[in-house]
Image: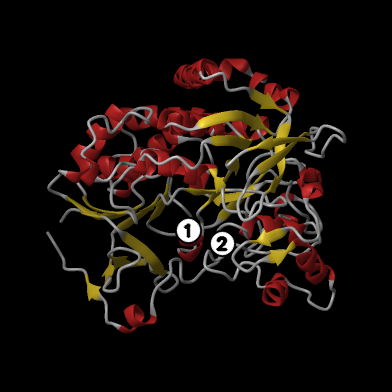
Amino acid sequence: MARHVIVVGAGPAGLAAAAAALRAGARVTLLDSAEQPGGQYHRMLPDAFAAERPGRLHHGWHDFDRTRRHVLGHPRCDWWAESSVWSLERPEPGDPRPPRVHVLRGPADGSRRERRVLDPDALVLAPGAHDRVLPFPGWDLPGVFTAGAAQALAKGERLVVGDQVIVAGAGPFLLPVAASLLEAGSSVLEVLEANPAATVLRGWAGRPWELASHGGKATELAGYTGLLARHRVPYRMGRAVIEARGDGRVEEAVTARLRADWSVVPGTERTVPVDAICVSHGFSPQLELPVAAGCELSLAGCGPACGRTTSHAPRSGSAACGVACGGTTPHAPRSGSAAFVRVDDDQLTTSPGVYAAGEITGIGGAPAARIEGLLAGWCAAGGAPGAPEIERLRRRRDQARAFARRLATAHPIGAAWTSWLRPETVVCRCEETTYGAFCRAADDRASGSAHAVKLGTRAGLGPCQARVCGPTTAELLARRGITADPHHRPVAQPIRLGELARPPREEESTP
């Protein structure tokens, strides 16, 4: 009987994992909450648009389209669109089987979603990442978008978020977002990279020979910079949006020059009339499912007390390093550091039968995610681990990981970003929790824990369930010596009580 591999997420990593598992002879169930595969990177137009050039805003569209058609048309692949994994049920300790997968099938706003339970032989997790946006005064005004949301609307609906737009934050993702907005018809006034030129150049210039294997990235960068030049869009380093202003919606952006630690240089503030601001300060991996599966996490980029720059496991249930890295007391990670899923050379996690690929193992971009997906899918399906093409994939994967480390070094989050905040600045948009209220609760020694601060301020308890504010509030707590785990979520996706009450449909065995 062919092994049954379930792949969660149909972005670059998940689609590649499905293709590799099919090639290795497995039966594959590919799940995604969207109507079409592709993830954020290849967000597709609805079929009803009947677009003549569906790949116009996409990089590498033809390779993606070929893989998509192959996977979805394969007789051993079941494609489950609009399907969300809301829970993973771990087996008893010592049981080598992967978790049972609890799925809701149907539109998220539908009233008759179907509950399904799947028992895989192997599970590949490739859920991707969220935009991370640091709070600043006015970021909760209508018209302030995450860069990923703005790009999704441009790619998936051909909608523009505004006519006069600023794209700001940190990292090379700002460039394709600006390109998508320009191609969709927006006027991009400027692109602002918060890190000064010296920081960015130092990160990219070290060990330059390692860049020889990433020629495609240089070509992609040249394409984006050429497009910005043709539209006369300035790209400014060491500058950020530190405030949004408006009556009922955003009307002005206040930008300022930043030092290397992201503190504001006094007297450099500038007010720009806008009708939209698109902001991204990197990405936060979606770790709810790996944590639910019992996967061990690694903490990337701990503070100076750690003495190490490589990833290592934090203590169980803690976002700080503690004694695992040789320190004697827990300490806060560097600003902007993130936890990722720990994997071995085959992309296998510490949970039996569970593989991970893509942004949840490290933010390296779509090419790195595809390579990891190919390895994870092949190994999950029981493919020969020593095949020559697999060894080549491992070498390419290691090169991609080196690129990801370089990316994190060139575009870090400065520790002084909190200097932008005021007591009335909202840090949790769902519950309208202000920075002042959050700090007062965190500094109250009577609270004593992240859980008490959460209950006292409601931060992270709103509809997004801390997906937006979780990394920010965890960092603010860590600076006060309070550890928090923003990824522990027994119910990974919203489920209605009526849906929970209905009995699930069990998987039927297929030879």
Spatial distance from mark 2 to mark 1, Cα to Cα?
9 Å
Q: Is residue 293 left or right of residue 468?
A: left
Q: Is residue 287 left or right of residue 319?
A: left
Please tell me how many numbered marks the rendered image carries.
2
Q: Compared with residue 472, is residue 377 higher up or lower down, i.e. above or below?
A: above
Q: Residue furthest bottom?
A: 501
N-terminal of the two: label 2 or label 1?
1
Q: Is residue 398 visible?
A: no
Q: Residue at x 45, y 48 (%)?
A: 128
Residue 133's x, y, as percent?
62, 48
Q: Are marks 2 and 1 in contact (CB under 8 Å)?
A: yes
| Residue that label 1 marks | 290
Q: Compared with residue 444, is residue 236 higher up or lower down, i.e. above or below?
A: above
Instruction: Classify 10 Å Cα crowding around label 1: few (below 14), some (14-19), many (20 and above).
Output: many
Q: Is residue 367 visible?
A: yes
Residue 236's x, y, as percent?
67, 25
Residue 458's x, y, as percent?
65, 73
Residue 239's x, y, as percent?
72, 32
Tag 2: amino acid: His
| Residue that label 2 marks | 487
Residue in front for this viewpoint, 406 or 390? 406
Where is residue 374, by image quadrant?
A: top left
Q: Compared with residue 215, is residue 425 higher up or lower down, i.e. above or below?
A: below
Q: Compared with residue 62, is residue 262 higher up or lower down, i.e. above or below?
A: below
In what quadrant of the picture does the C terminus appear? Answer: bottom left
Q: Residue at x 35, y 62 (%)?
A: 84
Label 1 secondary element = helix
